[in-house]
């Protein structure tokens, strides 16, 4: 097998790339990743230089990984700013680094694409070795793989890559052999206090005269797509962050993967006052972007969490991942779920220091999970990683 690196996903035929996907996660679709490049999102200007990896058996693509030369740590959600600061304080350059990830998407899933029925372990190890070798060839400080799937952890066993984990808050349908039928059935699984709080939050939205509806991407008109992008821009600008996703990329999603798009539209009368944009696979809903024109008590929770849970229950989805961070999600039925990343540090001195720091971090994170589960919203134990 031979490793080749591509300056854009346009250089790899969509059918060949998508044939390697182990599931239907929208974030690893050729359409999603190539759209980020083609429409001004994952670009050098924004800190992302495509450098995608393909493993070839002759001319046949047998494995691949979404890979980037990264010139900062924005849009990653696995925070290594302190590592970069340590490098800088000692007079070393941390950037650029090599990153295997999905831009702007704190979503777990396959990063080492090997297809179904392939010799997965061998190919995954081949991809990991190729990433490390490329980082060495380019004399980079480090290489990273963020939000790996559990099945991919074996590819790093016995290597000099450092393992790291964190927690996100995910909702799962009942895991005790039954499934909740509807939202009321789900509420019945919560403690009395949490059930009451959620009903009060939803009632606030109704009293404010706001109604919410869910539509897929091909059910939205031009005005509604524009509004969703405006909401996205407003949220990022309010927080002082750079909104990297362009309106052209939103239209690209509409054209190429409309049934993966799930939008919550919130109206007071005929006026759109808020909205959230989500993506879905066959069994999982992914919350992504939210924004509003009016501050309505409880509306953020309605648009970003309760409408999504209701959708999962109606559509038979197993999991709802609403995005990174947010302890407030716990009280609304989202439990801590492990995320995984792996890091290769070229300098052995920094590698040893970071390894020690990660050991301390892991102990603190396990204690944090225990504390969270002590405040579980469920009346009976419910699934958590």
Image (cartoon, helix red, strand yellow):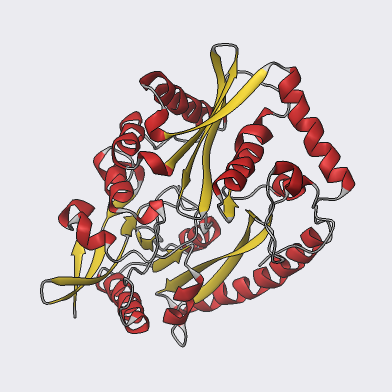
| Position above or below: 190 against 268 | below
Question: Whole-percent x and y of residue 156?
Answer: 44, 80
Q: Quadrant of the C terminus?
A: bottom right
The mark total stands at 0
The residue at the far left in this view is: 59
Question: Whole-percent x and y of residue 249?
Answer: 33, 36
The residue at the far top in this view is: 270
| Residue 8 seen from this side | no
Give residue 309's quadrant in the image: top right
Relative side of 380 to 141, left or right:
right
**Residue at left 38%, top 58%?**
95
The residue at the far bottom in this view is: 158
| Position above or below: 182 against 161 | above
Give residue 353's quadrant in the image: bottom right
Q: Quadrant of the N terminus?
A: bottom left
**Residue at left 58%, top 47%?**
312
Question: Whole-percent x and y of residue 88?
Answer: 46, 59
């Amino acid at each position: 097998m031979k490793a080749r690196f591509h300056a854009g996903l346009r250089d790899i035929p969509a059918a060949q790339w998508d044939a390697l996907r182990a599931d239907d996660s929208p974030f690893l679709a050729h359409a999603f990743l190539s759209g980020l490049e083609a429409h001004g999102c994952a670009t050098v200007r924004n800190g992302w230089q495509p450098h995608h990896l393909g493993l070839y058996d002759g001319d046949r693509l047998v494995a691949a990984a979404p890979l980037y030369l990264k010139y900062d740590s924005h849009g990653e959600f696995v925070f290594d700013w302190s590592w970069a600061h340590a490098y800088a304080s000692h007079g070393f350059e941390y950037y650029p680094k090599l990153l295997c990830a999905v831009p702007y998407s704190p979503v777990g899933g396959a990063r080492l694409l090997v297809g179904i029925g392939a010799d997965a372990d061998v190919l995954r190890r081949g991809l990991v070795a190729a990433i490390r070798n490329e980082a060495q060839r380019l004399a980079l400080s480090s290489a990273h793989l963020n939000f790996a799937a559990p099945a991919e952890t074996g590819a790093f066993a016995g290597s000099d890559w450092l393992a790291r984990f964190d927690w996100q808050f995910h909702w799962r349908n009942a895991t005790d052999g039954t499934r909740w039928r509807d939202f009321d059935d789900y509420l019945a699984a919560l403690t009395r206090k949490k059930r009451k709080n959620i009903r009060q939050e939803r009632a606030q939205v109704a009293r404010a005269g706001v109604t919410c509806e869910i539509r897929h991407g091909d059910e939205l008109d031009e005005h509604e797509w524009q509004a969703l992008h405006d909401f996205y821009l407003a949220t990022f600008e309010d927080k002082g962050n750079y909104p990297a996703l362009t309106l052209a990329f939103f239209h690209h999603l509409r054209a190429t993967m409309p049934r993966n798009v799930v939008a919550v539209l919130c109206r007071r009368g005929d006026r759109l006052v808020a909205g959230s944009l989500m993506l879905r696979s066959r069994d999982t809903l992914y919350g992504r972007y939210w924004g509003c024109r009016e501050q309505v008590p409880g509306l953020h929770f309605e648009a970003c969490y309760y409408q999504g849970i209701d959708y999962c229950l109606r559509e038979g989805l197993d999991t709802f991942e609403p995005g990174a961070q947010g302890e407030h999600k716990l009280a609304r039925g989202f439990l801590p779920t492990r995320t995984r990343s792996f890091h290769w540090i070229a300098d052995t001195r920094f590698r040893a220091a970071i390894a020690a720091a990660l050991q301390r971090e892991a102990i603190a994170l396990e204690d944090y999970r225990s504390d969270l589960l002590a405040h579980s919203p469920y009346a009976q134990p419910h699934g958590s990683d």
